Image: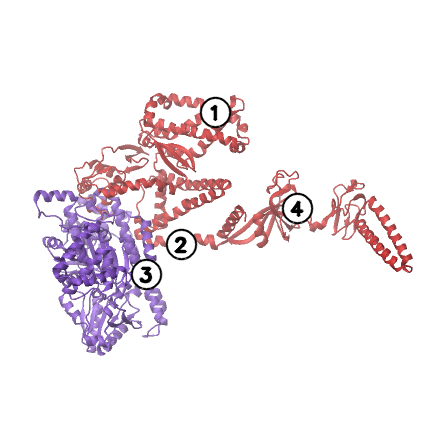
Chain colours: A red, B purple
């Protein structure tokens, strides 16, 4: 039942006497050892590959024989593959769609007008489907090309090729030699505002020359070029030409050269620009040369030369491997494989591809799709960084075109594809099952949820010994290095001024007391006055004594007293709050982790576990427990080592000398240092992975998206 | 000569360039259609009982009444002449309707009610008038028919069958004759020449099938001729040259519009001819014998979805077996085709299950209903192969000559309008496919129909017993009873039960001939029980005897819900017509096709909880029926929309074959 002989539309075409329009061209091509007869579609760019039987049929279409006669004749010829009625109807439909068919009928004028209308609205439709590349045809460059082609014909000869090599090859070598100079601060140089101006001037000219390269290559070998215009690539205007006439060149090398001509011109320009750049002094000319190199070199190699995108590289590839319509055939072939092996449809038509061709198709299609996703996502991120709203719009468009459209197409394929007619129920079940599985995977299956942060091995606040007041260090009360217990006095400061003030205050108290005593029983009124004075003096004294008491530092925890430069300390002046030393205790070291704002919610609400790795010994991981989550955020890092300037990941304000001021609010989370970490690790950077339990992928994604939107709208 | 100017004024109609006047096919966008359906869903129009239009007509009544017959005709000619330049303007329409109303009173003895005027107005505005059953659609239509015909247009009144076409035409002929309008009724089995002369008349009553076939015949005969060529031909050879059967597609007033435009539009209408078989008997015999030698699983595989195909090994086996045969056997493609068909014939189609042999002929049996369908054949080659398998005479091949969908055909009328009692569910689809709006017409008198509680039984037998008992009981009260059944078999079962009970009754089998018409005439008598298939529902008007009316009117028993709730309402609509009293009830069983096909799981799950032959929760039953019917309606709608979509795709792809071949 694979190919039914009879068609239900046969009665409409059986009596027709069709013929090809006189201007139709049939070309004989040899692709991968097989003869193809290719009818060219006048709208350009599309092939109609004819099977040998269809080709024979086409030869019979001279306007004298009816379709019925043609079919009977084809069947009687016996040998080889006969045509089914459906295939003949399809062939006629295709030829008609390509405006290549004439028949002995009155044209259906309403239908003709309708087609005309459709064609006109097609441009708009194309724009809506792919707003990233809208074509606007402007002029017919053919007369210009015809006039100049003879003069440039030598470029496309062996001599031209040699000249090109002679210019480009040395430039390549030199570019290698000057690589560091060329690439230093490239993004800064290219994206600076003054350079963008130069770029805006250089870019269209280079691209125009690129397109003229295509146009001349095609014209020189006899392929007319009738359309030139502007294409909006990601909203940036770029010139384009329609050189599809070259697709009928019998030589694959010529076709490939036409496709490559644009890149060849650009590389040539880049080479010339390199010489200029090397020769001239810094200035406008050098800047222009540099930009020509960037445009012609980089964009050519990344965009045009990449066969995974449908630009020049793709066409060169399809010409060289002799597989035209590679992308479409790949999709068709994959759809066939899917129908055949997943849906189990044994009666779908198998695309006629050879073994080597199958390999190409299998490899190319998924790769191209992945690359397209990658490019779209990159564009999206880049644009979103600059203009958030546009980024969101492009993201929506990308979602529709990369995921929505394929799903819609797959749906239509399952629901309507005639090949699946007998297997539709099964196909629908499998599709629904797969969709359910994917949804299940995304929305139900919990996956581990992690967030990462950096921190330092740090001391708890009570382990830090600070000066209680201003004063000169007098002496250690306990030698550094020896164990201390909580509450022990550690060192003493001396403040001459304070001790003098103390003495004065004590004297004043004594004086006031004496005065009060003497008047106490003599004069009540006076005594009340002096009693108040005594109280005042006593209060002053108490305060001073308190300050004096703080000159002695006490251990707030058990441990070993440590100081960085213990022997230099005596005699040094310490300000209040200044660090004097530490009371180190094995189990009291903590890890202070800096969590950015976007993750703090997770860490706070869903802390399940934490795993840390010391920057020095990344191989070993240790699990840690939470000691304290912060109430509020700070804008200062505990150590510059965590900031970008210090080699960390947290962005810091560039103007800050110490490199601890952060650009955004951060949160300091304390973890207990696990027992198996050596204590010498104090101050060392630590990578921390917080485990937040399990959550389905979709919710994880939604959370990130929400944070992104919230942060962008500054909510 | 017909003159359709009145139809064209101010309506922005694009004419087709074919042989006669018709609407050019309108390209419509899927989104536009979808929006149209949405619009129809949101905005339903109900005509106002006392609209200014009705007041205008009523205001003219006295003045018109005073005119003599000739003056009346002259007034009608004057106003319709004005319409040819001004279109169907409201004031002109009011005057024309007032005249037709008066003429009807004089000729038929029936004066149009106000609500019928509204229906007539809706028709000439190209809308569907939804009138409750029994509100006098046929009479309402005469307003539009007379006005359009007097204005010069060829008016086609489209009915669901020949019987109704004839009956309606007969009923109204005196009125048309009053205005000097000629009436034609086109029926099956008429010759082409008769048809042509009947279509030439001012007003034509015709069933939808006949009309569409005649149109297709015209397309085949006239081919690519365009209007101007036809005129030239007429000039050169004088009048009376054979041209189209139809005069053009001017006005179609479709009675039972939902049935014609929706229910029957599921499949395209195909006109075909039978040609002697071009392959020869021998080939089929060879194919059957070769297919008989193949081994299952080795040479061919039989799939679960009733399909069968050759394996690669089978293909080479076949090639070996047929290498000595000549002719088409040389082509591998033909080998596969023939052997594939032969395998299907041998293994997939069983005698007495899928077909029967009658007089040495293969006749298809419908798998669902078990009914024999004598006119149907299987797809090309298969039928002949089965004939070869059964050693019957090989019949010829059917060859399609032309085909058209109802959607496309009726869309070509310059003015398409319709009437129905039941447009509720299909309003959006009518708007979507035909761009027809539905206008609800208020009832003339409030309805006095009493809906008794439904009864549901587990088995069909229990149901029939209950129906018979119920019918006997009501009939003994001195009322008339109409029992609607879904099939001829069902009516026979019931008839036997009634005979067993000794109850007199009449059985109608939807042949709708003269005999049945007489039976319908008697159905309103006291104590009479009429058992009829649902098909008899539409259009039959059962006149009640006065004593029946006193005792509560006609009682209708529905014995099985139809897939479409509209059909059920049509049956109920036989009772309580035009303000008469009446009652209806449904006595159904869970074994009915509707439940078995659309809610099998629900029924199976619910069955154990049903406490025997009792009335279940009325709400539950209502919900079950509504769910099953909406599911059925949805499925059918999808089939219809698919038909349209395929038709459109096909039209678009085959643009090169020219208008007339499509």
Q: Is residue A403 above or below residue B576?
A: above
Q: Nearer the viewer, residue B408 or A423?
A: B408
Q: Are marks 3 and 2 on the same chain?
A: no
Looking at the picture, how far across and down is residue A172, in whole percent? 48, 26
Q: Secondary structure at mark 2?
A: helix
Disc 2 from disc 1: Cα separation: 58 Å
Disc 3 from disc 2: Cα separation: 23 Å
- Chain holding disc 2: A
Q: Which residue is mark 2?
A: A433
The answer to which quarter of the image holds residue A132 is: top left
Circle 2 or circle 1, nearest the eye: 1
Of pointers 2 and 4, the one earlier in the residue sequence: 2
Q: Is residue A3 visible?
A: no
Q: Is there CB contact under 8 Å for labels 1 and 3?
A: no
Q: Nearer the viewer, residue A149 or B407?
A: B407
Q: Is there CB contact under 8 Å for labels 2 and 1?
A: no
Residue A273's label in the rendered image is: 1
Disc 2 from disc 4: Cα separation: 51 Å
Circle 3 or circle 4, nearest the eye: 3
Q: Which residue is mark 3?
A: B631
Disc 1 from disc 3: Cα separation: 72 Å
Of pointers 1 and 4, the one earlier in the residue sequence: 1
Q: Secondary structure at mark 3?
A: helix
Q: Which residue is mark 4?
A: A457
Q: Residues within 10 Å of mark 3 (few under 14, many from 20)?
A: some
User: Measuring 32% from the left and 41% from the top, which residue is drawn there?
Assistant: A121
């Amino acid at each position: 039942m694979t190919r039914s002989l009879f068609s239900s539309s046969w009665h409409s075409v059986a009596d027709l006497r069709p013929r090809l329009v006189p201007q139709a061209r049939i070309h004989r091509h040899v692709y991968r050892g097989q003869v193809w007869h290719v009818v060219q579609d006048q709208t350009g760019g599309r092939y109609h590959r004819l099977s040998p039987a269809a080709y024979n049929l086409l030869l019979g279409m001279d306007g004298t024989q009816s379709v019925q006669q043609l079919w009977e004749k084809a069947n009687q010829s016996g040998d080889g593959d006969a045509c089914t009625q459906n295939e003949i109807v399809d062939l006629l439909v295709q030829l008609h769609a390509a405006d290549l068919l004439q028949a002995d009928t009155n044209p259906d004028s309403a239908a003709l007008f309708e087609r005309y209308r459709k064609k006109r609205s097609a441009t708009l439709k194309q724009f809506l489907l792919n707003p990233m590349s809208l074509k606007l045809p402007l002029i017919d460059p053919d007369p210009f090309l015809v006039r100049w082609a003879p003069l440039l014909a030598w470029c496309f000869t062996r001599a031209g090729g040699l000249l090109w090599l002679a210019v480009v090859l040395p430039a390549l070598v030199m570019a290698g030699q000057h690589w560091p100079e060329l690439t230093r601060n490239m993004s800064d140089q290219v994206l600076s505002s003054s350079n963008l101006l130069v770029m805006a001037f250089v870019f269209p000219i280079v691209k125009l020359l690129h397109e003229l390269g295509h146009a001349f290559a095609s014209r020189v070998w006899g392929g007319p070029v009738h359309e030139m215009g502007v294409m909006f690539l990601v909203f940036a205007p770029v010139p384009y030409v329609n050189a599809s006439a070259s697709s009928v060149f019998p030589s694959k090398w010529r076709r490939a050269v036409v496709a490559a001509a644009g890149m060849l011109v650009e590389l040539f320009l880049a080479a010339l620009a390199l010489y200029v750049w090397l020769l001239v002094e810094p200035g406008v000319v050098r800047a222009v040369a540099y930009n020509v190199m960037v445009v012609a070199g980089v964009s050519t190699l990344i965009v045009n030369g990449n066969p995974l995108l449908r630009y020049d590289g793709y066409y060169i590839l399809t010409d060289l491997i002799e597989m035209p319509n590679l992308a479409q055939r790949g999709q068709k072939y994959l759809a066939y494989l899917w129908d055949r092996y997943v849906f189990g449809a044994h009666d779908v038509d198998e695309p006629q591809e050879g073994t080597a061709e199958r390999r190409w198709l299998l490899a190319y299609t998924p790769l191209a799709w992945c690359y397209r996703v990658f490019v779209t996502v990159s564009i999206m991120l880049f644009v979103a960084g600059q203009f958030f709203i546009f980024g969101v719009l492009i993201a929506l468009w990308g979602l529709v075109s990369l995921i929505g459209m394929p799903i819609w197409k797959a749906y239509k394929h399952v629901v309507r594809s005639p090949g699946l007619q007998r297997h539709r129920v099964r196909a629908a079940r499998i599709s629904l099952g797969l969709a359910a599985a994917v949804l299940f995977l995304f929305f139900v299956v919990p996956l581990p949820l992690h967030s990462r942060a950096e921190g330092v091995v740090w001391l708890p606040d009570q382990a830090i010994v600070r000066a209680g007041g201003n004063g000169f260090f007098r002496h250690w009360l306990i030698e550094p290095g020896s164990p201390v217990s909580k509450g022990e006095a550690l060192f003493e400061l001396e403040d001459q001024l304070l001790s003098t003030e103390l003495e004065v205050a004590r004297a004043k108290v004594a004086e006031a007391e004496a005065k009060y005593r003497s008047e106490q029983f003599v004069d009540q009124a006076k005594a009340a006055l002096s009693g108040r004075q005594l109280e005042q003096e006593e209060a002053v004294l108490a305060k001073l004594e308190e300050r004096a008491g703080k000159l002695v530092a006490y251990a707030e925890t058990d441990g070993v007293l440590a100081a960085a430069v213990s022997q230099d300390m005596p005699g040094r002046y310490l300000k209040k709050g200044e660090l004097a030393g530490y009371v180190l205790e094995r189990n009291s070291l903590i890890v202070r982790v800096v969590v950015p704002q976007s993750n703090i919610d997770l860490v706070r609400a869903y802390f399940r576990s934490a795993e840390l790795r010391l920057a020095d010994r990344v191989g070993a991981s240790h699990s840690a427990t939470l000691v304290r989550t912060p109430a509020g955020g700070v804008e200062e890092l505990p150590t510059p080592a965590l900031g970008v300037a210090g080699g960390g990941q947290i962005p810091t304000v560039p103007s800050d000398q110490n490199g601890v001021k952060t650009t955004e609010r951060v949160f300091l989370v304390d973890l207990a240092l696990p027992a198996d970490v050596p204590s010498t690790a104090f101050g060392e950077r630590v990578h921390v992975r917080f485990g937040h339990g399990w959550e389905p992928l979709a919710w994880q994604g939604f959370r990130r998206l929400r944070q992104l939107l919230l942060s962008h709208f500054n909510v | 000569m017909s003159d359709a100017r009145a139809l064209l004024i101010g309506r922005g109609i694009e004419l087709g360039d074919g042989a006669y006047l018709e609407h050019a096919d309108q390209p419509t966008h899927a989104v536009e259609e979808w929006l149209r359906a949405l619009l129809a869903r949101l905005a339903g129009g109900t005509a106002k009982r006392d609209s200014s239009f009705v007041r205008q007509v009523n205001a003219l009544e006295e003045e018109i009444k005073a005119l003599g017959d000739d003056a009346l005709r002259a007034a009608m000619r004057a106003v319709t002449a004005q319409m040819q330049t001004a279109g169907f303007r409201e004031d002109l329409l009011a005057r024309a309707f007032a005249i037709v109303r008066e003429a009807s009173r004089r000729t038929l003895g029936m004066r149009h009610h106000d609500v019928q005027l509204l229906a007539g107005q809706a028709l000439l505005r190209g809308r569907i008038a939804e009138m409750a059953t029994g509100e006098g659609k046929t009479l309402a239509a005469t307003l539009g028919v007379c006005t359009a015909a007097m204005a010069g247009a060829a008016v086609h009144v489209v009915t669901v069958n020949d019987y109704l076409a004839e009956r309606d035409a007969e009923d109204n002929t005196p009125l048309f004759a009053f205005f000097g309008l000629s009436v034609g009724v086109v029926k099956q089995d008429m010759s082409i020449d008769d048809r042509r002369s009947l279509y030439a008349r001012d007003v034509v009553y015709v069933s939808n099938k006949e009309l569409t076939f005649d149109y297709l015949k015209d397309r085949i005969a006239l081919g690519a001729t365009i209007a101007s060529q036809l005129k030239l031909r007429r000039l050169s050879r004088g009048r009376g040259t054979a041209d189209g059967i139809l005069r053009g597609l001017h006005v179609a007033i479709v009675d039972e519009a939902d049935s014609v435009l929706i229910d029957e539009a599921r499949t395209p209408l195909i006109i075909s001819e039978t040609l002697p078989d071009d392959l020869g008997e021998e080939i089929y015999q060879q194919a059957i014998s070769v297919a008989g030698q193949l081994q299952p699983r080795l040479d061919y595989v039989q799939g679960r979805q009733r399909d069968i195909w050759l394996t690669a090994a089978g293909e080479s086996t076949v090639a070996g077996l047929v290498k000595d045969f000549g002719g088409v056997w040389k082509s591998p493609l033909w080998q596969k085709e023939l052997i594939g068909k032969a395998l299907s014939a041998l293994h997939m189609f069983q005698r007495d299950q899928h077909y029967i042999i009658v007089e040495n002929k293969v006749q298809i049996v419908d798998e669902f209903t078990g009914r024999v369908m004598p006119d149907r054949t299987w797809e090309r080659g298969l039928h002949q192969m089965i004939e070869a398998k059964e050693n019957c005479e090989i019949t010829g091949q059917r060859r399609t000559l032309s085909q058209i969908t109802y959607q496309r055909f009726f869309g070509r009328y310059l003015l398409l309008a319709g009437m129905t009692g039941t447009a509720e569910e299909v309003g959006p689809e009518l708007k979507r496919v035909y761009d027809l709006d539905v206008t609800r017409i208020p009832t003339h008198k409030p309805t006095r129909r009493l809906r008794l509680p439904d009864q549901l039984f587990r088995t069909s037998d229990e149901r029939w017993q209950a129906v018979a008992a119920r019918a006997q009981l009501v009939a003994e009260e001195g009322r008339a009873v109409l029992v609607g059944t879904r099939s001829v078999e069902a009516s026979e079962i019931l008839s036997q039960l009634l005979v067993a009970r000794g109850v007199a009754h009449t059985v109608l089998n939807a042949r709708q001939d003269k005999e049945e018409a007489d039976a319908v005439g008697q159905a309103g008598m006291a104590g009479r029980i009429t058992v009829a298939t649902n098909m008899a529902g539409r259009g039959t008007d059962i006149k009640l005897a006065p004593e029946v009316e006193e005792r509560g009117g006609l009682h209708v028993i529905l014995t099985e819900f139809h897939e479409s709730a509209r059909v059920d309402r049509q049956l109920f609509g036989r009772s309580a017509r035009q303000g008469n009293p009446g009652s209806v009830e449904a006595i159904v069983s869970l074994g009915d096709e509707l439940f078995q096909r659309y809610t099998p799981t629900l029924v199976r799950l619910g069955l154990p909880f049903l406490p025997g032959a009792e009335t279940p929760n009325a709400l539950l039953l209502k919900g079950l029926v509504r769910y099953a019917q909406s599911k059925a309606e949805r499925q059918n709608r999808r089939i219809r929309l698919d038909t349209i979509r395929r038709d459109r795709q096909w039209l678009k792809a085959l643009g090169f074959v020219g208008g007339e071949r499509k």
